[in-house]
Image: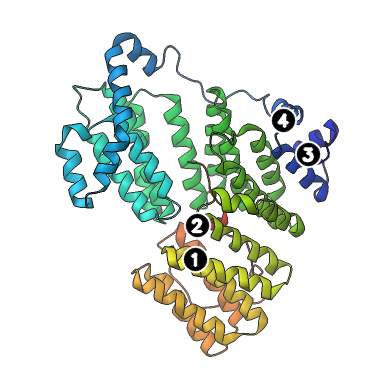
Amino acid sequence: MDDHPTAGEIRRFVEGRLEAGTASRRVVRHLLSACPVCQSIVRRRFSDRPPREELAAGETLLEAIRRAAPELVDRVAAERIRAPALLRELLRHPPPRQQLIVRHRRRFQTAALVRDLCEESHRRVGEDPDEAVRLAELAALVADSLPASRYPLELINDLRCRARAWLSNAQRRASDLAAAERSLGSAYALYRQGSRDPVELALLRGREALLRSDQGRSLEALEANDRAYQLYRSLGDRHMAGKMLIDRSVMLCEAGRPHRAIRAAAVAATLVEPEREPKVVLAIYHDLALAYSEAGQLDEALGCLRDAAGLYEEVGSRSEQLRRHWLEGSVLLKQRRLHEAACQFRIAQEGFAELGLAFEAAHVSLELAATYAELGWTQQVRRLAEEVLAIFRSRRLHREAIAALVFLVRAADEDRETALAVRAVSRFLEELESDPSRRFRPRPPRKGSVQGPGALLPEQSLLRSP
């Protein structure tokens, strides 16, 4: 464990008055060590704001069901036990058959199966967002098939709401932001027809925050995130409140406020429960590295990544391990350690391509291309652009992205301001994800008007809460 900081140091840190650098990183590492005294100081500092949303008065829906229909509680508990086996049985069938089964076989029409399908969708969203979308659609189909003779209508609408909230999240991760917006709107409408359970509202606010962030609407994202955070605090769920702060850390970083992002991640470390979800500590370390890099504290960023090396191997998924290589490459590029950066980018690029994550492969390839351009390796830039172009064409992805990559291939072939072309295409692909209607205009930006190479991208964040 690190040396115990003074109460004054911790207080100055959470108030933003502790000088950034090695001292602030030492405080963060100490907070992550779960020191109860220091965590209590942080919690008191961040517990003086009242919740922004009033919770419904009176008993919850579950309490009402237990009082009025105890047999329903017993049946739901029994369904919960059977649900994992039903899920395995269902997923052994091809997708068209799965839809027929849940529409016509009564034993698959259970509330517990809706929840398990939602959880399975979230579990797969980082590795295979298209499969996550399909599973969430299946959850919505089961929810829509629930018989009113077996469940209260409010509970059915709660489950329909939850399925569409997870569908929106999966569509967002699959870069279909228009579909994600429609599903989120549907979820809110169903919430108003349900029990208005604050747990469901907190889930919706959290998903809305992530969608607004990906849409580039940072102020709305932070407001929705804060509402979710306040709701979870009011419900007494410190762990989920901490996860909202993990999300907020990324959003603040993207909004150009990395020092506030660092503090949000540090407070999250005092709230989350690693025994409940071991991966949250990894997310905190990763987001701290992202924020330190954005703040220009590059040694601290590399230190966080290396402190968490064992966690990446122990609990990180394949895509999360690749994001670690991507972020480390970005930091090394900022330090002008070009050959080391290129090695990290190449590992990430090849891994994303193997997983079929085309946009991630494209983004990291462009950072690798920027590194090659800095080294003067024009032909390697051309080969990289051709590789990414082949990935996009094979998956019939956005034609404007393909047009941008064709432009980059030609620019590299003609050795025409290759580094500027790389940056222009990289920026365009980032904008395209939040606005699919954009059109590529093949004019590289003028010198001095673009961000430097290695700028951090939202996709590098681990992510984010469920």
For residue 58, above or below residue 88? above
* Residue 281: quarter of image: top right
Identify the secondary structure beneath mark 2: helix
Give the side of residue 69 with respect to residue 196, left or right. left
Q: Mark 1 or mark 3, which is nearer the start of the sequence?
A: 3
Dot 1 surroundings within 10 Å: few (below 14), some, or many (20 or more)? Answer: some
Marks 4 and 2 sit apart, C-alpha to C-alpha, by 32 Å
Q: Residues within 10 Å of mark 3 (few under 14, many from 20)?
A: many
Residue at (54, 66) in percent of width and height? 348
Q: 98 left or right of 269?
A: left
Specify the amino acid type for callout 2. Arg
First in sequence, mark 4 or 2: give its number: 4
> Residue 387: image x %, image y %?
45, 77
Evaluate whether residue 438 shows in this view.
no
Q: Is 349 positioned to the left or the right of 358 in the image?
A: right
In the rendered structure, find residue 39 and report the number of the disc placed on it: 4
Label 3 element class: helix
Q: Which residue is mark 3?
A: 13
Front tag of 4 and 2 = 2
Give the image location of residue 69, x and y in percent.
28, 12
Instruction: Kindly check if marks 2 and 1 are in contact, taking CB atoms under 8 A apart as contact.
Output: yes
